[in-house]
């Protein structure tokens, strides 16, 4: 039987190849994911190991019974010891500030950082900085930098002290030892000890130390000696302990990445699973067609004595062999891709230390092969059952065109309908909970459950409803002529096959559309929320105070320079003052309404502000009402203003500069709000503004909401890009499925194509017919997928973001159009190869008997 | 019948009724497959005329080249040398586009396997060639065809709901719908039981006698050939003779004569003008 199976596989090699490609891509995805996870673990390990420099051993203890570094240093065989420790300090130069991890100097062998310029600090007035931090602070070797750190005062309270050491060296972190903390600055070891002591009010306990074994000393002897010194074990199970650097790094890496890489794995493998489900659909389709085409051969086998089980087993064995070969190819492809990615990253000089080669573990090989083979065999189960139903008698009947039509059970339509209805109800409920009920967690849970359930219903029931949609679409295109009518009729002759093919595409497209819709809605909603929270792009506020404690005005020349910065489109002066009101004080913000409208992200926030009114934010409205009279008393007079309640939840009370002047004639414009051009890179523009402020020597703080928003946009874009990239794999597999289905259909319709040619179908018409078929199959899947994706994306956004206020449902037109175009184009391309095959059929074949 | 005559090869071209213009002609038509040692002459310089308005059967044993002859005449296959004319058009000189147009407008086909499109109804199958050509269906002609072929009650059925004979009648209607100059039928009864076969043959004959069409049929069944007005016998890629107004017995006798001719002395036997038939 195996011989027959292999012979059949050889005959159908071409047909199996396309299906195999689907599995190859799916398993390559899984293998690459596992490899990437391995690389991440490895990077974490390397980075941790790098922290210990060239240490041979690591000694550790608890805070209660800390290590005695001197005792360690005098132990036999020990060449050098350094405590493993780090602290943080605020590094400031002018307006720029960095919160930086700091480590002490140590023996060269225990210092993973490299000096690129200058040298290591040698006294309390010196510091070495990571090169990129120095760049950010705009300091060079020889400059000074403000270092702020917390110390405990005599009375036990926290104080910040600021020192101004000189930068003596610039550092590189070639092994990524401190990549997790963004590099590390270095201070002299004794200064470091002083810092730590001052921060705690007592000497800090050393809980971990790196040890270099002297040349010629025996590692295990030294290890035992150290264990004796600390009175501990040579494993970390108990404390204190002494272990080798490798052991320690492996252990911490495992601790550190335990949750992380699992998250990463689960995240990416979810997409791999989707890709494999789609691949499974493609496989199932292929085998269904193969079985139908082989009906006569199978019947013949039954005639000469094969029993049902043998026939069915033959199909499964075939699937197993195909799955195995394709999965192995997939692992090879995935590994090659992983390695290629590493090479590219190395060539591009990525600032993260990456391993040179991927690490092949048994999981990377075995898991994808196993999963890929199982998916393939699983997909062939139904076709195998169909094969067992081929009656021996079929061998004796005249060649009938193979029909895959078979009655569907009654359970399936009912169950899928039920799942869809319940699922969509849950989804709607989730959205309602999120928006109306303000229960995002519950809403999201209901939404996810509903979405998943309804999608299963939709996908499983596709075989019932999708052909009807295809029929309607077919009638639409059929009106355009006989070729299109032929194509439409062709897509409907095998409803099951068309449904499976379209469903494969539908799954991918739905998810892509859902993610982009969700992201677009999230972006719009969150942007609105941010506008509410941060009304302007950039705020520049004076931080120098006059003798009375009132903020100084922003100098006119600085203001002029700010307005001149590239990308700044408008500016408004802001005066802040606190005046008395009955029963308390009120903080007033005065802006010129005309200027302010040009600067505010939502100018309507100032609606109602005119001379004689006070626009009161709802947070400070108290029991004020629209039209109430607000009597304010300032140093220069008493003014009564009509209250206009603002819609926004702000804590500002806006008045006009003229009204404020009547209260207090002498309020400096201590803030300037700036608006940025939408087209400029907000991060750059805010940087330029910070530079202007820093260069002016004025003391002012720049708050760049715009850069925050740009970062936020970038995060969404990056996340969306990654997710869409991962989903694209599923779409690609589905498109392979479309091509596969078309070519299988064409092979099956050889005689028919020849007949059509014989009765007057031109070559162009035949090509056109197949193109329309491809377009129909792909188009139906893509359009339905986009519609479903929009619904899911909106429901998800409503459920998750409803709590943030009005959810704006937006359609990501660009993405939608792109997805549709790609799908339609792919449908068209998918028809090219089959059309070539079909055209090879000479009209003479219509006359052939067999 | 006394008129049934087995005419020798050299007279074949002149055997046409003098008043009829040939609808289809072959001149030195040759088709060879393979090269060198393996070369096979499927057709070896065939000259033959088929009259318009007549029902001609091409007969011969398996591998005699009768199907190849039909493929070349219909422009379905390309000739190695020689010419085939449909009316005054040299079919062998046409490109694919012109051939497609020719098949649409001037030629109809009836296949052994019926070759109806399973997803279309009988009516849609019949009108398909006209639609592919972008023309409109001549309803009067359609009604005539459907009535003549007895398909009025079957127009909305799909092929799977029709018997073999009915399917072949739909195929005949499809072949005739564009009012082609010639209908080529390739073993049209090969897949039918004898009753349905008789039915189909009668319809082919009626379409010639009553509707004035020209039908050229390839068959190896003497009974089927007997429905034709004229039988052209073919053997070893050459015209081996012909029988006018054949009866099954005459055709059988002709075939027998052919077999006896399959000898080194084929030329002499043909010379003899052997009378074959009762």
Image: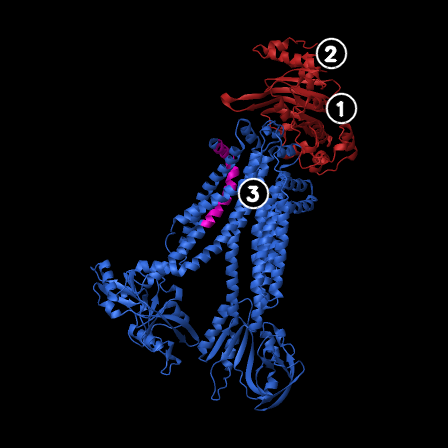
Chain colours: A blue, B red
Residue A138 falls in image quadrant? bottom left
Report the mark closest to the observer, 3 or 2.
3
Q: What's the distance in space between the residues labelled 1 and 3, CA to CA?
A: 47 Å
Image-based side of A545 in relation to A437, left or right = left
- Give the Cα separation between the discs numbered 3 and 2: 61 Å
Figure label count: 3
Discs 3 and 2 lie in a common subunit? no
Q: Main secondary structure of the magenta part?
A: helix
Q: Secondary structure at mark 2?
A: loop
Query: Does residue A55 appear anywhere in the picture?
Result: no
Quadrant in the picture for the C terminus of chain A: top right
Q: Earlier in the sequence, mark 1 or mark 2?
A: 2
Residue at mark 3: chain:
A
Q: Residue at x 50, y 60 (%)?
A: A718
Of helix, strand and loop, which one carries label 3? helix
Q: Which residue is mark 1?
A: B206
Chain at numbered mark 1: B
Residue at 56% of width from left, 40% of height from top? A382
Circle 1: element type:
helix
Label 3 sits on residue: A739
Q: Nearer the viewer, residue A418 or A803?
A: A418
Residue B58 in the image: state x and y as whole percent: 66, 20
A82 on left or right of A587: left
Residue nearest the viewer, comparing A101 with A575: A101
Instruction: Please say whether residue A400 is visible from this viewpoint.
Output: yes
Residue denoted by label 2: B1
Task: Determine whether, in the image, residue A537 is placed left or right of residue A104.
Answer: right
| Stretch in magenta | A4-30
């Amino acid at each position: 039987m195996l011989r027959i199976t292999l012979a059949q596989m050889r005959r159908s090699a071409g047909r199996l190849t396309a299906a195999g490609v689907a599995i190859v891509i799916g398993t390559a995805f899984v293998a690459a994911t596992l490899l990437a996870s391995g690389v991440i673990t490895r990077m974490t390990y390397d980075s941790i190991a790098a922290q210990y420099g060239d240490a041979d051993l690591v000694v550790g203890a608890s805070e209660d019974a800390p290590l005695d570094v001197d005792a360690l240093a005098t132990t036999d065989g020990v060449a050098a010891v350094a405590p493993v420790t780090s602290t943080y300090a605020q590094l400031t130069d002018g307006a720029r500030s960095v919160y930086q991890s700091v480590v002490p100097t140590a023996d060269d062998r225990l210092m993973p950082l490299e000096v690129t310029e200058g040298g290591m600090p040698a006294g309390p007035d010196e510091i070495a900085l990571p090169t990129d931090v120095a760049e950010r602070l705009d300091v060079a070797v020889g400059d000074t930098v403000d270092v702020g750190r917390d110390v405990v005062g005599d009375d036990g309270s926290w104080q910040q002290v600021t020192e101004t050491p000189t930068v003596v060296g610039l550092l590189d972190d070639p092994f990524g030892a401190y990549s997790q903390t963004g590099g590390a600055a270095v201070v002299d070891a004794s200064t470091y000890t002083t810092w730590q002591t001052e921060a705690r009010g007592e000497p800090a306990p050393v809980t971990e130390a790196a040890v270099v074994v002297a040349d010629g000393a025996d590692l295990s002897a030294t290890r035992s000696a150290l264990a004796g010194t600390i009175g501990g074990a040579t494993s970390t199970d108990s404390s204190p302990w002494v272990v080798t650097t490798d052991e320690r790094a492996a252990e911490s890496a495992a601790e550190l990445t335990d949750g992380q890489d699992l998250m990463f794995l689960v995240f990416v493998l979810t997409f791999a699973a989707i890709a494999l489900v789609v691949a499974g659909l493609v496989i199932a389709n292929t085998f269904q067609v193969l079985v139908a085409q082989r009906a006569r051969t199978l019947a013949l086998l039954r005639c000469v004595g094969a029993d049902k089980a043998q026939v069915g087993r033959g199909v499964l064995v075939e699937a197993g062999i195909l799955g195995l070969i394709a999965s192995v190819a997939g692992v090879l492809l995935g590994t090659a891709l992983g390695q290629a990615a590493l090479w590219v990253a190395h060539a591009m000089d990525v600032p993260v230390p990456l391993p040179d080669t991927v690490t092949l573990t048994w999981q990377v090989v075995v898991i994808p092969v196993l999963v890929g083979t199982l998916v393939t065999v699983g997909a062939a189960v139904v076709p195998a059952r169909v094969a067992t139903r081929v009656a021996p008698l079929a061998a004796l009947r005249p060649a009938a065109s193979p029909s895959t039509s078979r009655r569907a059970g009654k359970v399936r339509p009912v169950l899928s309908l039920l799942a869809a209805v319940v699922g969509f109800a849950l989804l709607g409920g989730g959205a309602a909970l999120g928006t109306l009920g303000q229960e995002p967690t519950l809403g999201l849970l209901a939404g996810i459950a509903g979405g998943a359930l309804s999608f299963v219903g939709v996908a499983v029931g596709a075989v019932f409803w999708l052909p009807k949609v295809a029929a309607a679409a077919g009638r639409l295109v059929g009106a355009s002529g006989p070729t299109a009518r032929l194509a439409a009729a062709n897509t409907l002759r095998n409803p099951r096959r068309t449904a499976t093919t379209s469903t494969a595409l539908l799954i991918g497209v739905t998810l892509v559309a859902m993610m982009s819709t969700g992201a677009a809605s999230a972006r719009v909603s969150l942007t609105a929320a941010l506008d509410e929270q941060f009304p302007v792009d950039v705020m520049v506020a004076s931080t120098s105070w006059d003798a009375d404690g009132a903020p100084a005005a922003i100098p006119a020349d600085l203001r002029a320079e700010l307005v001149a910065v590239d990308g700044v489109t408008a500016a408004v002066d802001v005066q802040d003052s606190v005046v008395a009101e009955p029963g308390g004080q009120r903080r007033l913000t005065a802006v010129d309404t005309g200027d302010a409208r040009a600067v505010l992200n939502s100018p309507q926030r100032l609606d109602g502000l005119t001379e004689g009114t006070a626009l009161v934010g709802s947070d400070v409205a108290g029991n004020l009402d629209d039209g109430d009279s607000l009597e304010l008393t300032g140093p220069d007079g008493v003014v009564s203003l009509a209250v206009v309640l603002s819609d926004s939840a702000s804590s500002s009370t806006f008045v006009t500069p003229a009204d404020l002047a009547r209260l207090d004639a002498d309020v400096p414009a201590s803030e300037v709000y700036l608006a940025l051009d939408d087209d400029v890179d907000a991060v750059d523009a805010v940087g330029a503004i910070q530079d202007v402020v820093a260069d002016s020597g004025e003391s002012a703080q720049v708050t760049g909401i715009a850069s925050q928003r740009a970062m936020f946009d970038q995060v969404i874009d990056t996340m969306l890009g990654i997710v869409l990239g991962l989903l694209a794999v599923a779409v690609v597999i589905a498109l392979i499925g479309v091509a596969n289905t078309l070519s299988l259909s064409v092979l099956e319709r050889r005689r028919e194509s020849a007949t059509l040619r014989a009765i007057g179908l031109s070559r162009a018409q035949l090509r056109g017919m197949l193109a329309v078929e491809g377009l129909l199959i792909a188009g139906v899947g893509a359009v339905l997928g986009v519609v479903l994706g929009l619904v899911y994306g909106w429901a998800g956004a409503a459920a998750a973001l409803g709590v943030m206020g009005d959810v704006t449902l937006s359609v990501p037109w660009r993405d939608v159009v792109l997805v549709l175009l790609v799908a339609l184009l792919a449908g068209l391309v998918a028809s090219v190869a089959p059309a070539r095959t079909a055209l090879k059929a000479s009209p003479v074949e219509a006359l052939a008997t067999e | 019948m006394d008129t049934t005559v087995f005419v020798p090869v050299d007279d074949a071209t002149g055997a046409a009724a003098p008043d009829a213009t040939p609808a289809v002609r072959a001149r030195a038509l040759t088709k060879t497959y393979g090269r060198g040692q393996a070369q096979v002459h499927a057709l070896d310089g065939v000259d033959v005329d088929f009259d318009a308005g007549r029902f001609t059967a091409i007969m011969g044993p398996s591998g005699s080249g009768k199907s190849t002859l039909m493929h070349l005449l219909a422009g379905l296959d390309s000739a190695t040398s020689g010419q085939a004319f449909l009316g005054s058009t040299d079919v062998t000189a046409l490109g694919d586009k012109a051939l497609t147009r020719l098949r649409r407008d001037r030629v109809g086909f009836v296949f052994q396997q019926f070759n109806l499109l399973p997803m279309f109804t009988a009516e849609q199958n019949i009108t398909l060639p006209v639609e592919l050509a972008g023309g409109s269906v001549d309803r009067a002609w359609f009604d005539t065809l459907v009535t003549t072929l007895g398909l009025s009650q079957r127009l909305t059925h799909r092929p799977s709901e029709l018997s073999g004979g009915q399917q072949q009648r739909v195929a005949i209607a499809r072949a005739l719908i564009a009012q082609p100059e010639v209908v080529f039928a390739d073993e049209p009864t090969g897949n039918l039981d004898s009753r349905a076969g008789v039915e189909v043959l009668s319809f082919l004959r009626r379409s010639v006698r009553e509707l004035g069409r020209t039908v050229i049929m390839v068959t190896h069944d003497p009974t089927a050939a007997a429905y034709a007005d004229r039988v052209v016998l073919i053997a070893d890629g050459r015209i081996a003779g012909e029988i006018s107004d054949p009866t099954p017995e005459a055709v059988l006798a002709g075939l027998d004569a052919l077999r006896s001719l399959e000898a080194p002395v084929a030329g002499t036997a043909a010379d003899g003008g052997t009378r074959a038939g009762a």
